[in-house]
Structure formats: structure tokens, C-alpha cells
Image (tube, helix red, strand yellow):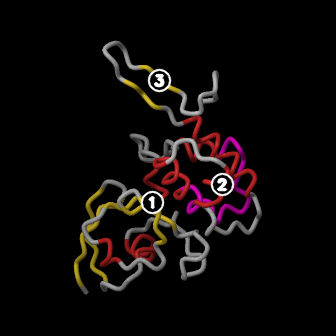
Amino acid sequence: MDAISITVNGKAQSVEVTPDTPLLWVLRDTLGLTGTKFGCGMALCGACTVHVDGEATRSCTTRISAVAGRNITTIEGLGALSPAGVSPEVSPVQSAWLDEQVAQCGYCQAGMIMTTAALLAKNPKPSDADIDDALGGHICRCGTYQRIRAAIHLAACKCTIVQVTSGPPITVDPCDKPGATR
């Protein structure tokens, strides 16, 4: 076994696994980060999606050797842990998921949320077509696709942009809607 260095949720890690071990199993079995789910093992359902250097990536088919030295973010890393380390603070995407009551069984949700976070980082005001394109490879057995779309639009409104000018910072609503929910 080789020692492979990666950064997971901002923390440098060295793992001793074979180079062809899927990232999913390193996260779940070696590091104990079980928020990332195993769904199909063939990168077809999206349940295993994490970020590798900010890009949504299917961890079930990504070998650990392919991400050596890179930054991995899991669902656990989207919200910063509270000082007590017990209750996480949620990201705008996670908050929108809760507000829209998206999850039923919840199995696919971590992957959907990770892909949504990557989408909003690149496209802060996605259209329905953009959302459909980004999430096209995800499967939700409970069929909550309409609530997922509503949550993504809400998350886009929760994400704010701060512009610094010569005066005080100005918070701008990315949805261009007066009085949007934050």
C-alpha cells in the first residue's frame, strides 16, 4: 500500500491504500466520512458526488491516485462545524434544501447538494435548463425533482455577493429580486 496525500474538507490527510481504491471508499471506510453515499458504483446515479478542486466528481469511479495532492470537499465540508464540533452550520444550498423540504428518503441528497453547490459557484443564476443539465445524471428514487429545482433557485437567492467600493461593502441580491429571502 502507498501513502497518498489529499486534503479533505480543508484538512491535510495521508491515507495508506492501494492506488486504485475508489475515492468513495477512502472517504467512507478510511476517513469515516459517511455522508457521501454508494449508489450504483458506475458513476450513473450521482449519490457519490463530491468536489475535487471545486468540480463535482463521482467518487465511486475516481481512483484515489487520481486525486493525490488535490482538494476534496464532501457534504460534511459544505457547512463549517460549530466550535463545539456538534451541530454543523449549513451552507446556503443545504439551508434551501431544508426550507423546501426536499428530502424524503434522503439517500441521493448529498450528491444533489454537492452538484448544486458546484453549479452555483459557476452560475449563480441558473435557469431551469441549466439545473436540468447539471443534475441530469442524478437519480432521485422519491421523485422530488420539482422541490429540488425550487431549492436551487432559493439557494441562488440565499447566496449573496458583497461588492466593496470606496465606501462600506454593499450586499447585492444575485437574483435581482427586491426583498429576496436570505
In the image, residue 135 sits, relative to residue 39, either above or below, namely above
Residue 34 x/y as whole percent: 50, 67
Which is in the foreground here, disc 3 or disc 1? 3
Front position in the image: 132 or 32: 132
Mark 1 and mark 2: Cα distance apart in space: 26 Å
Mark 3 and mark 1: Cα distance apart in space: 28 Å
Residue 173 x/y as whole percent: 54, 28
| Residue pictured at 45% horizontal, 65% vertical | 33
Residue range (magenta): 97-113
Q: Quadrant of residue 46?
A: bottom right
| Residue pictured at 41% horizontal, 42% vertical | 84
Count of numbered labels shown in the rendering: 3
**Hey, what amino acid is under mark 1?**
Thr
In the picture of the structure, the residue carrying the numbered disc 1 is 74
**Hey, what amino acid is under mark 3?**
Thr
| Structural crowding at the residue carrying mark 1, measured as other residues with C-alpha within 10 Å and reported as few (<14), some (14–19) or many (≥20) | many
* In the image, residue 96 lies in the stretch drawn in magenta: no
Residue 81 x/y as whole percent: 43, 46
Quarter of the rendering occupied by the C terminus: top right
What label sits on residue 171 in the rendered view?
Answer: 3
In the picture of the structure, the residue carrying the numbered disc 2 is 129
Residues at badges 1 and 2 in contact (C-beta under 8 Å)? no
Report the side of 147 relative to 122 (left or right): right
Q: Quadrant of residue 143?
A: bottom right
In the rendered structure, which disc, 1 or 2, sits on the residue that comes first in sequence? 1
In the rendered structure, which disc, 2 or 3, sits on the residue that comes first in sequence? 2
Q: Secondary structure at mark 3?
A: strand
